[in-house]
Image (cartoon, grey):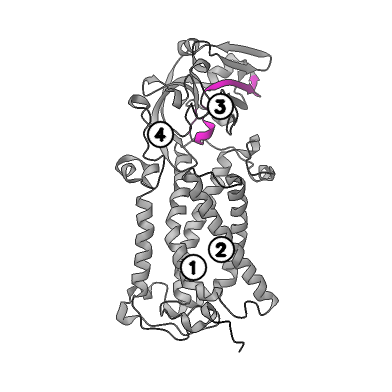
Amino acid sequence: MTRGPGGPYDPAIWRSPIRGAWLASFLSVGLLVLFGIDLITGYLSHAAYQPDLGQSFSGGGLDRHLYGWDWPTSPAWLYAFTQGLHITAGIAVLPILAAKLWAVIPKFYKWPPVTCIADALERLLLGLLVGSGILLIFTGLWDISYWYTFPFSFIIVHYYAAWIFLGTVLGHVLIKLPVMREAFRTRGALKPLREDLAQTRPEPPSETTSAPSNPAEPTVSRRGFIGVVGAGSLGLVLLTVGESLGGPLRSIALLSPRGRQPGSGGPNDFQVNKTADGRGIKAKDTGAAWRLLLKGPGTLMMLSRDELLAMPQHTYTLPIACVEGWSTTQDWTGVRLRDLAAMAGVKSPDRADVESLQQGGSFRQAALNPGQVNDDRALLALKVNGADLSMDHGFPARMIVPALPGVHNTKWVKQIQFSGGAKA
């Protein structure tokens, strides 16, 4: 046997008797569930941005070919649910991931590190798996904390890290599935959770597991360890999920920077992500001189806010949901987009392109698919909760479309262009 360099490479220093194939496998199941939720909801979040309409932020636009379906408008809370679940699951995974790394850390210090080509490939796969997983978690935490000091695009890095993670986790599961199956077969899937400290016994040491060769006396049972990890995960959920669910839990959403943040008071007293001042919107831009530019095939017209208010008004209770996970539901009043399309000479338009007054920055423009433009509840909102929109909420007019990501519910609307469909 080759003598290692000592320190963490000495198997004798790893003595916890609860390490082994069962603990690693049990934690892996939890990780697979939560990461699986994150990968599915991440896919749905990216689909909601509708890259097929040219709204791809992943860098190369290759993803346009992966989303051949229109994001729906029903149920109206769809994006709030999927993105809230994405963020909550991503935070809940933290204690479980830390516990899994602790459970298998002796295997990271194997000596010699590589013994054959297959071993090298497995360790490379493991490195990519751990690295991409940690990168996904930390870039996600940076995003929901609005901490954008890193020297790269969050969206591009997070997007491609997810594809790397998906490929490596599938490969890792295929390699470790026999170990997991054997661990659950010999020890039972749940039996160790019924064992107290006195019944806790170490697993036999093995080259393929992290079971210690020189185990110490147990100081905690596997049940106790899993209980602490589960309590930590549940605690993080309770401090986060209120940003999506609202109600009494919103007041304890301490891990959500926007989930508990109020607006400017009164009917406009709800969360603001981007303020008018932060986007360079001045009072003179939204005053009496403001006009909505309405475009259609061969049609160009301008409407004042008073003219918009004179049109048939409709009120719907709809949520705004942000990519950071928070959402809020309010009563919005305004003009139906399909009525504006008819004025622009387009019946049942296939697309609407919306442009904001803001100068520069991301999400200055947004495109809507046919279902979104023609939904009865899709509004150019002029009021919220019976009052005029505040400047920070998009005065003089903003988009409100069911199930649309918040960033595409464009504020301070300057122009709407309708295309496709038939002439009105």
Q: Which residue in the structure is indicated by mark 3? A: 373
> Spatial distance from mark 4 to mark 1, Cα to Cα?
37 Å
Label ID, residue 336: none
Q: Residue at x 52, y 77 (%)?
A: 8
Q: Which residue in the structure is indicated by mark 2? A: 130
Residue 238 percent coordinates (x, y): 35, 51
The disc, 3 or 2, on the residue closer to the chain's N-terminal end is: 2
The disc, 4 or 1, on the residue closer to the chain's N-terminal end is: 1
> Spatial distance from mark 3 to mark 2, Cα to Cα?
42 Å
Q: Nearer the viewer, residue 106 or 345?
A: 106
Pointer 1 and pointer 3: residues touching (CB < 8 Å)?
no
Q: Which residue in the structure is indicated by mark 1? A: 101
Q: Residue at x 61, y 63 (%)?
A: 128
Q: Quadrant of residue 421?
A: top right
In the image, which residues are magenta? 400-422
- Amino acid type at circle 3 is Val
> Spatial distance from mark 2 to mark 1, Cα to Cα?
9 Å
Q: Which residue in the structure is indicated by mark 4? A: 271
As for residue 411 lying within the magenta part, the answer is yes
